[in-house]
Image (cartoon, grey):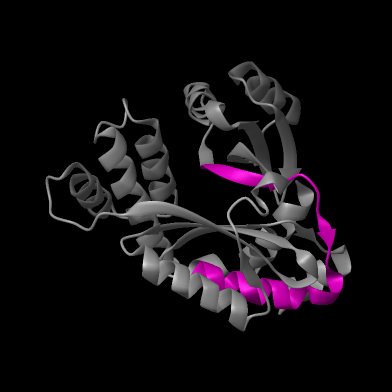
Amino acid sequence: MSGHSKWSSIKHKKGAADAKRGKIFTKLVKEIIVAAKEGGGDQEMNPRLRLAVSTAKGSNMPNANIERAIKRGTGELDGVNYDNFTYEGYGHNGVAIIVETLTDNKQRTVADVRHIFSKYGGNLAENGSVSYMFEQKGLIMISENDLDEDEVMMASLDAGAEDLIIEEGNFIIYTAYADLHSVHKKLEEAGYNIEKAELTRIPQNTIQADEVAEKLLKLIDHLEDCDDVQKVYANFEISDEVFERLAED
């Protein structure tokens, strides 16, 4: 788990999320539309939509944008239809990479993803080539603040979570893939302020990649910059020294 969190933490420290807020909003709107389309516009009856809206609010998306996206998903407003497609590939040093997308044009998306892999030193592979190297989990983040670690741990386990770690001043709570929504709801009912809750993929093993970390991060940056890409996962880790150096760049 720590290997996966390191490269994502580097991007966080570099301020990439704030710099790409417009793209983040686009990705969140797509997720809300698809969630509403598949499960309806009632958040209480649609866990995926409730999670998407919670994430959007955590990113300070205006309520008007959220409501429009829900209505586009339910058909109350005209909009584009999006479908989920997942692509798998390899980066430098054989690092496994999974790319999750939401798109209205599969041909365009696969062409864009293949081009980015090729241009930045990776290669697109067949579906199933690397997905077995990752385990699907739920992830919930709560700001550490003045909370007691033991109390948060007990509350998380009572809610059905599997594990808890402290990282970058936050409690990171892992759940079984199918239990994310129920654990999220129980922790909210217990009074905890959820900073983020999402389905994620955790690499079962990681590749040490100090020598190619900068190239790998460039590849991942460009994949994440693709309009149709929602999330990117990779199974590498880097040393603290390289981590700090890249975080300061």
Q: Write down the quadrant of residue 104 in the picture.
A: bottom left
Left or right of 30: which side holds 201? Answer: right
Image-based side of 122 in relation to 245, left or right? left
**150 in relation to 198, above or below:** above
Q: Is the residue 113 above or below the residue 101 in the image?
A: below
For the residue pair 60 and 226, the one nearer the viewer reads as 226
* Residue under the point 37% across and 50% down: 31
Relative placement, left or right, of 110 versus 8 is: left
Task: Provide residue 47's location: percent of width, then percent of height.
Answer: 39, 31
Please indicate, yes or no, whether residue 166 appears anywhere in the rendered image.
yes
Q: Residue at x 78, y 54 (%)?
A: 3
- Residue 248 lies in what quarter of the image? bottom right
Locate residue 49, reporting x and y percent.
Answer: 35, 38
Q: Nearer the viewer, residue 163 or 228?
A: 228
Q: Is residue 248 visible?
A: no
Which contiguous range is marked in magenta? 196-225
Query: For residue 223: magenta?
Result: yes
Above-or-below relation of 5 to 193: below
Q: Residue furthest bottom?
A: 119
| Residue 29 picture location, percent across and down | 33, 55
Q: Is residue 72 left or right of residue 175?
A: left
